[in-house]
Image: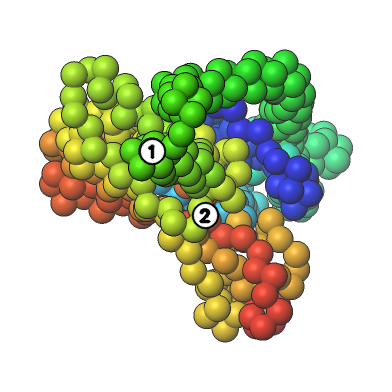
Amino acid sequence: MNLIPSPAERANRDPSKDTQQRLDPLGALAAWPLAPIMAAISVGNAIIATILQADQIQSQPLAALALLAMVGAGAALVVGAMPARAPFEPGMHLLVLGLALSASVFEQASKWGHNSRLQDDFGQLGIGLLLLALAPYRPWRQIALSGAAASVVVGALALAQAQYLSIIVPPGVYAVVAMTMVLAPAAAGAAYSRRIVRSILAWQTDARRADVVRAAETRGQVAQSVVDEQIAALRAGVIPLLTAVLERGAISPRDIERAGVFAADVRRALVEQVDSTWLDGVVERERATLTERGLAPLLVVSDADRRATAFGPDQRAATAALIGALCELRGFDPGSLVVQVTGSERRGLGRLPYRAIPARYKELHNPRPRAPHVDTVTVQAGVDLPTRRLRKALRPYLGVLRAVFVRVRVKVRHPLVTITFDDERVNTDPDVAEIGQPQ
């Protein structure tokens, strides 16, 4: 999917917070199975290790807490990585790390003084695997820092238990072994995140340059086609009228009436060209496709204020893909699609606590932004499909929408499906109150 950022978006974006999920939502969606697989491996390893090392456990409650914490870390990873919850929030990252680290601490405490080996403990490996699974969703620096912080904790625990371990080696070796079990997978995840983000950004830059070159090459062709269309229109009506007037040498009331009709047609065509947006082009393309299939489509676009023009390339691509997917669904009613774009000022946001402000908004804009302007897109269509099948068919498109828009809401009342999503931008109105800072 071509998600090329505009210059304004690149200026607002913090490169240290770029992730695969934000730059390439479809790619992150394809990597989604990694999260439940890593969670299952971590939890399964914890259960097996606890059973096999039952003779080393001195505190059953602490061992149970260790298992519960690892299960919670795996569940938090799976829930946070679900396409329906995109993007993966920093708070969920900290929750995964905190629970996994707690599981390791509880495990060591449950076997304190009777732990024979560090290599078969599940806590360190579980932390590393869960951090590895965060690679498509979190920035590489945060993954690396999380791994380093967690490795310091498990290394300190290993040093503290050196006198109890069965293998006699210098205490520093125990710390290195424990830290490596965390650092190796975390470093692999950070390296993947860093590499994939750089590759996507480089590809987007190359694609933008190629697009500029193609636009320059085709500009002349487009201009010539417009001239040809105008000449064809003149030949069909205006030129015959002028020729007839010249031949007669006089203007009749009939000529005046026909000239007025031609002028109205030209004025209407010019107004339509000026008022049309990329959204009108998307709907017109789908209308033509449905017509070719022998249907009689009635697709409506309501965007009187031309708010769709403010959407970025990724948002336009995601919206166009959703509309195309709806029109291609089996059971789609070609006379039911309505796309509406409305706007509002979220003035009440200035009174919200800092933690309640959308994370995407805080990341994209200045530390003290004005209350944002909100554009809401509502797509409504009739689709004669069971609710479960409909949601399954739309799931990939909704996952992308959730990565590029602030809020996405879906309501299905068979056969009507309504999808609403919001975009927020900085409000430059000086009369709007500023958003509060962290307390």
Residue at 38% in and 32% down: 284
Question: Between residues 109 and 267, which one lies in front from this camera angle?
Answer: 267
Q: Based on the displayed image, in which of its 4 quarters is residue 25 positioned?
A: top right
User: Answer yes or no: do the residues labelled 2 and 1 have beta carbons within 8 Å?
Assistant: no
Point out residue 243 in the picture as x, y percentages from the top left corner: 48, 22
Location of the C terminus by quadrant is: bottom right
Question: Between residues 309 and 407, which one lies in front from this camera angle?
Answer: 309
Q: Amino acid at mark 1?
A: Ser
Residue identified by numbered label 1: 252
Q: Is residue 45 visible?
A: no
Q: For this view, does 340 lie left or right of residue 200?
A: left
Which structural element holds mark 2? Answer: helix
Residue at 53% in and 73% down: 346
Point out residue 107 in the picture as x, y percentages from the top left corner: 56, 51
Q: Which mark is residue 307?
A: 2
Q: Amino acid at mark 2?
A: Arg
Point out residue 113 in the picture as x, y percentages from the top left corner: 65, 52
| Residue reaching furthest to the front | 249
Location of the N terminus by quadrant is: top right
Above or below 244: residue 97: below
Point out residue 32 in the picture as x, y percentages from the top left corner: 47, 33
Above or below 84: residue 236: above
Which structural element holds mark 1? Answer: loop
Question: Between residues 423 and 223, which one lies in front from this camera angle?
Answer: 223
Q: For this view, does 433 lie left or right of residue 268?
A: right
Residue at 59% in and 27% down: 2
Q: Which mark is residue 85?
A: none
Above or below 393: residue 171: below
Q: For this view, does 292 lie left or right of residue 124?
A: left
